[in-house]
Amino acid sequence: MDFNVKRLAADAGTFLSRAVQFTEEKLGQAEKTELDAHLENLLVRAENTKQWTERIMKQTEVLLQPNPNVRLEEFVYEKLEKKAPTRLNNHDLLGQSMIESGNEFGPGTAYGNALIKCGETEKQIGGAERELIQSAAINFLTPFRNFLEGDFKTILKERKLLQVKRLDLDAAKTKLKKARMADARAAAHHLRCLNDFVEAQTTYYAQCYQYMVDLQKQLGSFPSTFSNNNQSSVSGGASISVPTISVSASLPSVSAGHGSSAASGGFNELRGSNGSRRARVLYDYDAASSSELSLLADEVIVVSSVPGMDSDWLMGERGTQKGKVPITYLELLN
């Protein structure tokens, strides 16, 4: 027997994902894809049809054979695929008793002849009863039984398959949602790191500029003319001019030339003040949990800082709706 460990592990993982999804749906912690309303109605009708078919079959069997022991015996013979022994029904037994008693009293007597006539009639009724049972079994009970053991089992199988596929779909949607949430948080963290890197570079170049300005001042304090008596090739009075840079020139403002640093400063100021500001949404954002607020691009909301909240998030308000929002999706307004 070929035993595939990888396939077994994959099947176990799929089963576990379905079980987790089903449990979270029952606890209200995961979204559930609703089936088509017409399909749901058909499934309910199929279940009702099954229940009423079983009930009608049971009552019909009781009508055709009131004796429960006989019904049980016939059921066992049917499961064993054997033919049940032929037995006389109540009308047959009554008719046979009447005929025997009529013969005993004498067919020539009025009473004996009457008993024989009644017995023959009871036997005819017994035969009609057997025909009724046979006809009902073939034309009525058998189609009902075929529905329960055939069509309805197929419906149950397809419904189970549909349920499995729905669980797989919802499990995949849940994983995708969690992955998007993790990606958004990672992007926010990376953007913050990039802002810190650019700010560090800006500080570095500002320091370099200041060092060069100080060096220029020092060089400007030396004499601007040098004489070299040992070199005849240099004409008397020749001067070497040191290029100068105007000290009054200043480095452009770091905050004015860097929008992201200004935005970061605005968010830091908002956290420090514990106040609220209006902000414009830059991109659409789908809330990953009930504590977050979904956003639409270009809408304007009110944001504020909450003590203890992650630095990548602010508390957003839109009318009566309130929830956490990532700062990388926002632009503070004046």
Image (cartoon, rainbow, N blue to C red):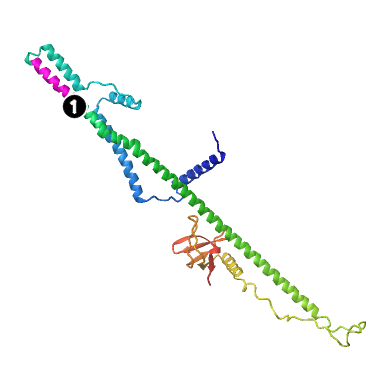
The residue under the point 52% across, 53% down is 178
Q: Secondary structure at mark 1?
A: helix
Q: Nearer the viewer, residue 323 or 326?
A: 326
Magenta residues (range)? 111-128
Residue under numbered circle 1:
128
* Image quadrant where residue 212 sits: bottom right
In the rendering, at what x and y percent does residue 12 appear?
52, 41
Q: Nearer the viewer, residue 188 or 107?
A: 107
Q: Is residue 196 magenta?
A: no
Up the image or down, 127 lies above or below 182; here it is above
Q: Is residue 127 magenta?
A: yes
In the rendering, at what x and y percent does residue 110 appear?
6, 15
Up the image or down, 319 lies above or below 252; here it is above
The residue under the point 29% across, 26% down is 71
The answer to whether any part of residue 15 appears in the image is: yes
Q: Nearer the viewer, residue 36 or 141?
A: 141
Horizontal relation, residue 222 to residue 302: left or right: right
Horizontal relation, residue 69 to residue 315: left or right: left
Q: Residue furthest right?
A: 230
* Image quadrant where residue 137 sits: top left
Q: Residue furthest front?
A: 1
Q: Residues within 10 Å of mark 1 (few under 14, many from 20)?
A: few
In the rendering, at what x and y percent does residue 300 appear?
48, 68
Horizontal relation, residue 9 to residue 207: left or right: left
The residue under the point 62% across, 71% down is 258
The N terminus: image quadrant: top right
Label 1 sits on what residue type?
Answer: Ala
The answer to whether any part of residue 308 appears in the image is: no
